[in-house]
Image: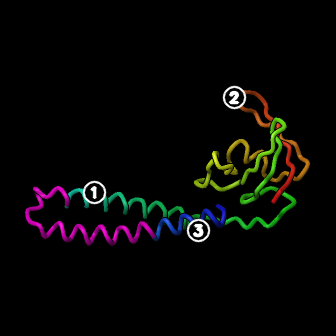
Amino acid sequence: MTKAGYEKLTKKLEELRARKVELVKEMELARQEGDLAENSAYHQLRETVTIVTQQIEQLDSKLDGAVVAKNNNKNKIGVGSCVVVAVNGEKRELQVVGDGETDPLNGKVSHQSPIGSALMGKKVGNVVSIETPGGVVKYNVLEIK
């Protein structure tokens, strides 16, 4: 996982924990409104707290097992590398990221995806051929940032 990805998940975890505290307060207020059997606001809040708690547990688990990539190597592509490649005569900028950080529309490809895994360890000047449903596509590594 990249440092930016780790920080983003950490921030999201803090936001979820703060939200849970607020939801529990709201739930206490709803509980004071009377008969819980007919109190739909209370039951809705309870369900939301359960969902938020599950999200917190998932993020905690993901962050506990996370390995933050320290890729300072500008000579070889690794997790965290920003790469300029030529594909079919067109320049593209990609960032190789960890799972859970992928965003293909913004050029973030997983190191385990076909493109990311093919680029891992490559250097400027290397050409990588990747099998796609539309046929073989060649990626020429122009720059590693």
Q: Amino acid at mark 3?
A: Glu
Residue at image mark 2: 133
Mark 1 to mark 2 CA distance (whole Å): 42 Å
Q: Which residue is mark 3?
A: 7
Q: In the figure, 114 relative to 78: above or below? A: above
Amino acid type at circle 2 is: Pro
Q: Residues within 10 Å of mark 2 (few under 14, many from 20)?
A: few
> Within 10 angstroms of label 3, few (less than 14), some, or many (20 or more) residues?
few
Ranked by sequence position, the earlier of labels 3 and 1 is 3
Q: Of helix, strand and loop, which one carries label 1?
A: helix
The magenta-colored residue range is 15-41
Q: Cα distance, mark 3 to mark 2?
A: 35 Å
Is most of the magenta stretch helix, strand or loop?
helix
Q: Could you classify mark 1 by the number of other residues whose Cα lies within 10 Å: few (under 14), some (14-19), or many (20 or more)?
A: few
Q: Pinpoint residue 54: horizontal percent, then vertical percent.
A: 39, 59
Q: Position of residue 80 (x, y in %)?
A: 72, 60
Instruction: Determine the residue located farthest toward the front in the rendered image.
Output: 90
The amino acid at mark 1 is: Glu
Question: Are discs 1 and 2 less than 8 Å apart at CB?
Answer: no
Whether residue 52 is situated above or below residue 132 in the rendered picture: below
Q: Is residue 18 magenta?
A: yes
Question: Mark on residue 47?
Answer: 1
Identify the secondary structure beneath mark 3. helix
Left or right of 131, for residue 43: left
Q: Quadrant of the C terminus?
A: bottom right
Task: Name the one closer to the observer, 58 or 144.
Answer: 144
Q: Identify which residue is drawn at 73% across, 50% down.
A: 94
Dot 2 lies on which element? loop
Residue at the image point whose x is 86% and y is 43% from the top: 140
